[in-house]
Amino acid sequence: MAEDLLIKKKREFSLIELLMIIMVVGIIFTLVIPMNIDRRNYSKIKEAIKNIQIIARADNEFKNNPENGYYAFDIGMLNVADKLEKTGDVFLFDYSVTDSTVVATTNENFGKAGAVIYYYLPNGPWGIGKDKISESVLDPAWLP
């Protein structure tokens, strides 16, 4: 008799419960997606940092070699093209060397062209461009 008194009710989601679950999932995604974008940008920046360090070391060696007699202003003269790291088959940055600075500028392969990272020769410091593109794409905390 006691079994007859118990009514088995099938439990279903109400509309409010379903909306709450969708809201919680949406909040989680709004937190995760920007972190993922930052992580991807950071890995791209690491490529630039390694390449700048390769260029800076080669530039310093070139400058300190008495047989050269002059200072290298061009990456081609430093013979580092085969040592530079790249993502897949493309470079994410374009590099240039002046007498006191190595400059890495993002290109279309990075996703947003025109952001600039500076490395002042011979021993730093690092810096980012003072323009809106550089400040929106690059985080100074990522630099060594």
Image (cartoon, rainbow, N blue to C red):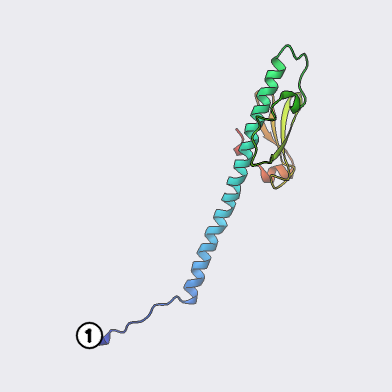
Relative height, residue 65 to residue 101 (above, below):
above
Residue at 77 percent of width and 13 percent of height: 69
* Quarter-of-image position of residue 119: top right
Q: Residue at x 62, y 32 (%)?
A: 50
Q: Nearer the viewer, residue 34 or 96?
A: 96
Residue 40 placement (x, y as % from top left): 60, 46
Q: Quadrant of the rendered structure where residue 128 is?
A: top right
Secondary structure, mark 1, is helix
How many badges with numbers are in the image?
Answer: 1
Q: Is residue 31 visible?
A: yes
Q: Amino acid at mark 1?
A: Ala
**Residue 129, how many percent across, how many down?**
72, 38
Is the C terminus in the top left, top right, bottom left or bottom right quadrant? top right
Residue 112 horizontal/vertical position (percent) = 71, 47
In this view of the protein, which residue sits in the foreground, 1 or 127?
1
Q: Which residue is mark 1?
A: 2
Asked whether the viewer can see residue 125, the reply is no
Q: Quadrant of the N terminus?
A: bottom left
Task: State the residue lying farthest toward the top.
Answer: 66
Is 90 placed above or below 101 here?
below
Q: Position of residue 137 (x, y in %)?
A: 67, 45
* Crowdedness near tag 1: few (<14), some (14–19) or many (≥20) residues, C-alpha within 10 Å: few
Left/right placement of residue 79 relative to residue 25 reads: right
Q: In the rendered view, would you say 91 is above or below 52?
A: below
Outermost left residue: 1
* In front of the other: 49 or 65: 65
The one of 123 and 75 positioned closer to us in this rendering: 75
Q: Residue at x 68, y 46 (%)?
A: 136
Position of 21 with respect to 94 (left or right) is left
